Structures are given as C-alpha cells and as structure tokens.
Image (cartoon, rainbow, N blue to C red):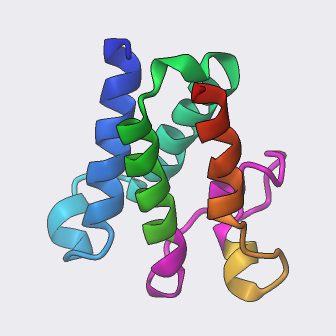
Amino acid sequence: MDQATFDRLEMYIKWSEDLDLDYDKHFGHVDDPDHLVQISRDGLQKQLDSDPSVFTEEDLNKLKEKDHFILANIENSSRWLSSDNKEPKSHWWWHLDKIKSGEMEKPDIEKIFILYFNQLK
C-alpha cells in the first residue's frame, strides 16, 4: 500500500473512532469534522476503484469495521453533511442524513466487501 492510501486509511479509522468521543474536545478546532470522515472515506473508495490490489485483507477488514461503525452510530451524529449533493448513492457516506431518515436504504456492508475481498484473489 502506498503511503498516501495508508494515511487515508489511518485518518478514516481515527476520525471514525473519534465520532463517539467528546465531539467538541476532539473536533472543536475543525470547521467541519464530519466532512473529514467523508473525505477520507471517499479517497479510500477512489483507491479501491482504481487499484484494489494495494489493500491487504487486513486493510479491508479495518475499513469494513469502520464502515459498520459509522452506520451503527448514525443516530448519534447530528452533524453529518446534508445529502444535497451530486455524489452517487453507492458512496453512501455522503448520504448519511438520508439513511438516518429512512429515505435511503442502509448499505449492506458485508455484501459490498465480498466484492473487494474477491478482487484480492
């Protein structure tokens, strides 16, 4: 895995873990901390789409775990970006408000990651 992809994965893991901590303490200095989670996840997806071979099985498991974490904690976050954007529905992390409201179905993370793991073989 190249350093930039590794850094994005580490940022995504850290920022997603911090979402369940004291928000202002950890993110008070950042204008839009939820946006950091979404940007880092988006960068990881672009890497998966262009060259999934840079990810190891361990990397994918970490990413899958954090995706589950984001969805499991969706009710606890009131600061997610509005889904008034043009991102595709497959990039569900940009549409968390729609998932939260029930307007959009929650993605099946396990099914999504089966495809990624199959690409490693």
Q: Which residue corresponds to the image point at 52% horizontal and 87% vertical from the top-left?
A: 75
Residue 75 lies, with reference to residue 70, above or below; the image says below
Residue 73 lies, with reference to residue 41, above or below; the image says below
Q: Which residue corresponds to the image point at 42% horizontal and 59% vertical from the top-left?
A: 66
User: What percent of the width, then of the height, locates residue 121?
Assistant: 60, 26
Work out which residue is located at the far left of the displayed protein and give it. Answer: 25
Give the quarter of the image for residue 93: bottom right
User: What percent of the width, then of the height, locates residue 111?
Assistant: 71, 59
Does the magenta run of residues contain 92?
Answer: yes
Does the magenta run of residues contain 61?
Answer: no
Residue 121 lies, with reference to residue 105, above or below; the image says above
Judge from the rendering whether residue 53 lies leftward or rightward of residue 65; answer left or right: right
Judge from the rendering whether residue 33 lies leftward or rightward of residue 90; answer left or right: left
Give the quarter of the image for residue 101: bottom right
The magenta stretch is: 71-96
Q: Nearer the viewer, residue 120 or 6?
A: 120
Screen quadrant of the N terminus: top left
Q: Is residue 78 visible?
A: no
Q: Which residue corresponds to the image point at 71% horizontal and 42% vertical from the top-left?
A: 115
Q: Nearer the viewer, residue 114 or 11?
A: 114
The overriding secondary structure of the stretch rendered in magenta is loop
Work out which residue is located at the far top of the displayed protein and give it. Answer: 2
Residue 83 lies, with reference to residue 87, above or below; the image says below
Q: Is residue 66 visible?
A: yes
Q: Which residue corresponds to the image point at 79% horizontal and 86% vertical from the top-left?
A: 102
Q: Nearer the viewer, residue 15 or 111?
A: 111
User: What percent of the width, then of the height, locates residue 77?
Assistant: 46, 79
